[in-house]
Image: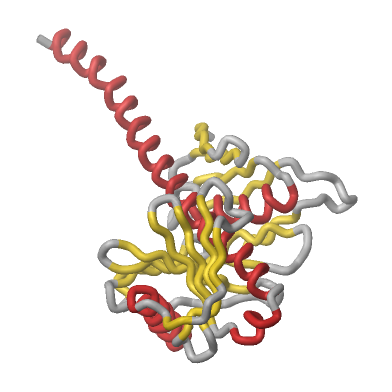
Amino acid sequence: MNKIIYILILGILPISAFSQEISNKIILDSIIKEADLLYNYEKITWNSTDLAYSNKRIKENIGTYIVYHSNDTLFAVFADKEYKNQIAKYTFTKKNLKVPCSEDFEIKPIPEKISKIFEIKNVILNNLNSNSEKYSFSFQKGFNPNPVLIPEVNGFKLYIIIGTPNSNVIPFGNDYLFKTDKRGNIIYWRKFHKTLIATQTKGPNNEVVVSAIHSHLKMTPYISATDICTFRLYGFDLFGIEEFIVTSTALNKLFIYNAKQNSITETDL
């Protein structure tokens, strides 16, 4: 009887390990999917604002902007200073985030659906500004918080990732996620990193950096979508660095992200 039980237990162990691998793959695939969406929104923001501010008429009248998507199409809408009229709209596809497939410069009232997104964005940002101590906001000089609002079926999510005009820096860290209901009331939030992790893209003697690494505490056991988005924007797009590594103290693993393959691999420490 003991022999039979022993054999059964031995048979269960590989299945458990296999199940864990499947579970991790599902988690990592979901992180890549979320990172892709976040990157698309921020890349469209970069490219559409460059276009808008290069147009004198639009530049002089910009009050705010939003980005939203439908399937594989992304839209950047710029409103006037009264937030009443659309003064520019750029449409992109996921296949080409650099050049819009169409542009609309006709001045017209903002559609109600889009106006609602503008309204929610203001509600959330006003809430965050009024409760900065609650969320432990602290942003260093030269590193600016960039809010990325993404509509969802039952509400909205707003990421805060860090941008910087500083050269040769990947601004990891100091990043947040806020989830809200349809009215913009915050129902969940988290901070991915406790501090800013300003990672240099060149060595002290101007050496080329081929990879970057930072550690995650137990509060963020996996590599994050914000990590990947920031790396793609600054490390890969600007400086051609192809990979970075996250050390997980909670899981005792290394997560290696490769930008060319847009994939995550994991290894045990």
Q: From the viewer's perspective, is 153 left or right of 118?
A: left
Q: Where is residue 152, by image quadrant? A: bottom left
Q: Can see residue 22?
A: yes
Residue 148 lies, with reference to residue 141, above or below; the image says above
Q: Position of residue 149 (x, y in %)?
A: 44, 68
Q: Can see residue 174?
A: no
In this view, the residue in front, 19 or 178, is 178
Residue that appears at 29% across and 78% down: 183
The tally of labels here is 0
Residue 241 lies, with reference to residue 167, above or below; the image says above
Q: Position of residue 135 (x, y in %)?
A: 45, 77
Residue 256 lies, with reference to residue 119, above or below; the image says above
In this view, the residue in front, 164 or 69, is 69
Residue that appears at 66% across and 71% down: 143
Q: Position of residue 105 (x, y in %)?
A: 56, 74
Residue that appears at 27% across and 22% down: 15
